[in-house]
Image (cartoon, grey):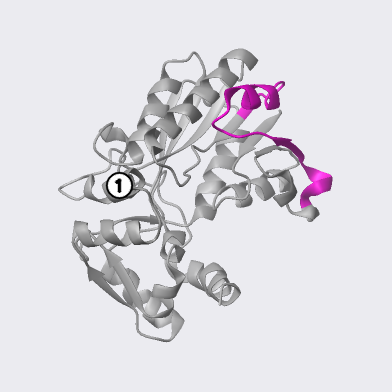
Amino acid sequence: MRIAVTTPNGNVGHHLTRMLVRAGIRPLLLTRHPESIAAELAPYVDVAEADSQDAAQVVAATRGVDAIHWVDPSVMSDDPLTDYARATDALVAAVTENRIGRVVFQSSIGAEKRHGVGEIDGLAATELALDALDIDVTHLRCGYFFSNVLLDPESLRAGRLTTVLPVDAPMAWVAPRDIAEVAALTLLNREWSGRRVQAVHGPEDLTWARVAALLTEELGREVVVERISDEQMRQGLLEAGMPEAMADAVLGMSTGMREGFVPEQERTAVTTTPTGLRGWVREELVPALAATR
């Protein structure tokens, strides 16, 4: 089975690539920067240069592929939803022209709303486009990545987290490695068919207050969380260099799921994954903070 992986250096992709290699698969890695693939992987992978928003490049790179793990790349953009649409068009063209029969799509909790969830609206549109094709497709509706706390490492070092969500509202938090594991198992499992939605909820729902408390315990210094206004969040994103449309799309991912949102998929043995926040902090956050000091 020929499996292609997009964003192979991403939070999920770098785990997924190594899992497939360990499973005896020689994955095809699609990337805009082939030189960025780790040298240690070179004997075990094939690499194709392709921009996920360029249909011609994606079609050319995926000839002979049987299955693909697809990520709509989030890039700094003046028009992020149009970029998502271009990525969707590239995927649909590749699946159609190359007769790729199986897709595992990295989506998000909130995509079931279809509209009003910022950047996630782009993922919802990809889901709908894939559902319209005569293929086997699994949408991985993922919770909030643990790794998102590293988006602002300086604030984290200073002991401050910010959110526009209620700090005592529980939601699904998940380790990117667990998403990669579900993706790998889904790609390798030949028993499923048709359209599937597979939520990836992590081991437990966490509040922002609980996250701050766990970080305080594990990092050995106080970490507090502050709920800020939507406008404060937007201004902070703009000051960080985001274009207005991008800032609005990022903010919308939180505000669109703030009032009474309940994920379509319940927490069950199927949607629950094992890696807890405490373990992730020890294994990944602490080394990452040291590396970016």
Relative horizontal placement of residue 209, taking residue 155 as reference (left or right):
left
Report the span colored magenta. 41-67
Relative horizontal placement of residue 88, taking residue 28 as reference (left or right):
left
Pick the residue in front: 37 or 32. Answer: 32
Would you say residue 55 sits in the magenta stretch? yes
Of the 4 image quadrants, the one containing the C terminus is bottom right
| Residue that label 1 marks | 253
Instruction: Check the image and name the residue furthest to the left.
Output: 259
Residue beneath the point at 29% across and 46% down: 248
Residue 130 vertical placement versus 238 (above, below) = above
Q: Could you tell me if residue 205 is visible in this image?
A: no
Residue type at tag 1:
Met
Residue beneath the point at 59% across and 43% down: 7
Q: Position of residue 32 (x, y in %)?
A: 65, 40
Of the 4 image quadrants, the one containing the N terminus is top right
Residue beneath the point at 15% across and 47% down: 260
Would you say residue 163 sits in the magenta stretch? no
